Image (spheres, rainbow, N blue to C red):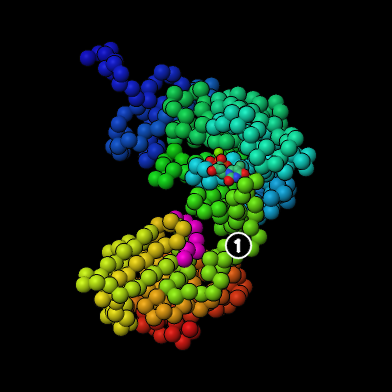
Amino acid sequence: MAGAGPPGGYSRPSMAKEKTSFTCSECGGASPRWLGKCPHCEAWNTLIETVAETASGGRHRFASLAKTSAVAKLADIEASEIDRTPTGISELDRVLGGGIVEGGVVLIGGDPGIGKSTLLLQALDGLQRADVSTLYVTGEESGAQVALRSRRLGLENSQVRVLAEIQLEKILSTISSTRPAVAVIDSIQTVYSSELTSAPGSVAQVRECAAHLTRAAKAGDTCIVLVGHVTKEGALAGPRVLEHMVDTVLYFEGDTHSSFRLVRAIKNRYGAVNEIGVFAMTEKGLKGVTNPSAIFLSQHSEPVPGSCVLVTLEGTRPMLVEIQALVDSGGPSPRRLSVGLDRDRLAMLLAVLHRHAGVACMDQDVFVNAVGGVRISEPAADLAVMLAITSSLRGKPLPKGFIAFGEVGLAGEVRPAPRGQERLREAAKLGFSVAIVPRANAPRKPARDLEGLVIHPVERIEEAMELVRSLG
Ligand code: TYD
Ligand code: MG
């Protein structure tokens, strides 16, 4: 019926303002209205509100994120050295590649409550004490709450300037009038632009606000740090959509029940990626842990049976996780239980162990656990799981500083894991000394960044079992 609006109470992203239109995140096609299905590629639920193009050039979406300049030959462009300002928190400086960079944009992601606000407040205070002008924009907490945290952190007399604001335009005008050297936006999900009708935290708002802030950073030579929450489901509106826009992406990792936190650089235009900073959450904020391998060594002063350290890739990042197994004589129907690992896969691995390596657990209860509450879904955990089980069954610990990874097939073959070099480098960096890995993952020639790690390549599971016996 012409002119009839949606029934009362029914709401959807509206076109209240003509300034906005909708763009498909799949094919990039545009639509003046919100539709459930893209009229171009017919994908469902892909239309996202964007600021519409206007004749006066009011379109911001495709404006350059970097400063623009005339065409020049590469050789003629001056390659200026990047100036870094250390934050004074050495573990943070390490992941940043030395410190903050003028006009650089950093994204810090992580689960709620993991310590993002705490770390950044500590960093800002350190910078301010070194006479670097700072601004902390809080959208989640009031100024009083931030002040309370600063007292808790023992930051008496802190000169960090705080702005409690969530409207993008006001934040931008404060940044341009106060011109801080560093500004933290905590968090990007609370900021909204009045040019868009979507709710704060939606993909459209997060993307648009981050783009404006990035441009402000480049224009005013301010380093802007965006804080983003990652939800457990990896929600679309999370920091993931911003990764390509910013210069540096850092993620917090770790179990909020334990005190250790890892900050990892997964993208850095000004430094190395996969650099990690390790912190411990204390009563007085985050403290850097300078010898991170101690985290793992402190759990068992001497190797214990049934424990094997696995180098796994969580998403795109390698991580060391202890796999524990307990094999104990069971009743008439022995149990197979796993926490953090797939139970069907465990049953399969037990069958392979029996058939190809002659290790029988038929009349035994088998429990397997990935320490720290991590969930491991990749098959590259197979070898570590099997080694932990065998170690528990025999009551013999694996060698000190031991790691393993690799997928094991039904025929007993040990298959390569993706990005084996990175895993080995991670293990070497954390101070591990012996590794059993698939042959295809072993480096062909000695590598400097693998110094101190003795690598034993294997092709079959029985070979791995034999090796462990000879090493033990
Ligand atoms: P927070 O920095 O607020 O997390 P995020 O900004 O990532 O959501 O961290 C909050 C947690 O840290 C909270 O559970 C309390 C704890 N905490 C400490 O243990 N010690 C401290 O000194 C502070 C400030 C917080
Ligand atoms: Mg916070």
Q: Secondary structure at mark 1?
A: loop
Q: Is residue 64 visible?
A: no
Magenta stretch in the rendered image:
315-322
Q: Residue furthest right?
A: 131
The spot of residue 100 in percent (x, y) is 68, 46
The spot of residue 455 in percent (x, y) is 51, 78
Residue topped by disc 1: 292
Q: How many marks?
A: 1
The spot of residue 330 in percent (x, y) is 27, 72
Quadrant, the N terminus: top left
Residue at (63, 37) in percent of width and height: 149
- Taking depth in this image into account, of 85 and 333 the one nearest to the observer is 333
How would you rate the neighbour count of disc 1 (Cα within 10 Å): few for under 14, some for 14-19, many for 20 or more? some
Is 401 a magenta residue? no
Q: Is residue 366 above or below residue 117?
A: below
Q: Amino acid at mark 1?
A: Pro
Q: Is residue 48 visible?
A: yes
Residue at (39, 29) in percent of width and height: 22
Q: Quadrant of residue 176?
A: top right
- Taking depth in this image into account, of 20 and 330 the one nearest to the observer is 330
Q: Is residue 291 above or below residue 392?
A: above
Q: Residue furthest top?
A: 3
Q: Quadrant of residue 26?
A: top left
- Taking depth in this image into account, of 120 and 372 the one nearest to the observer is 372
The spot of residue 18 in percent (x, y) is 43, 19
Q: Please tell me whether the stretch drawn in magenta is mainly helix, strand or loop.
A: strand
- Ligand 1: give its quadrant: top right
Q: Is residue 147 above or below residue 372?
A: above
Residue at (51, 28) in percent of width and height: 192
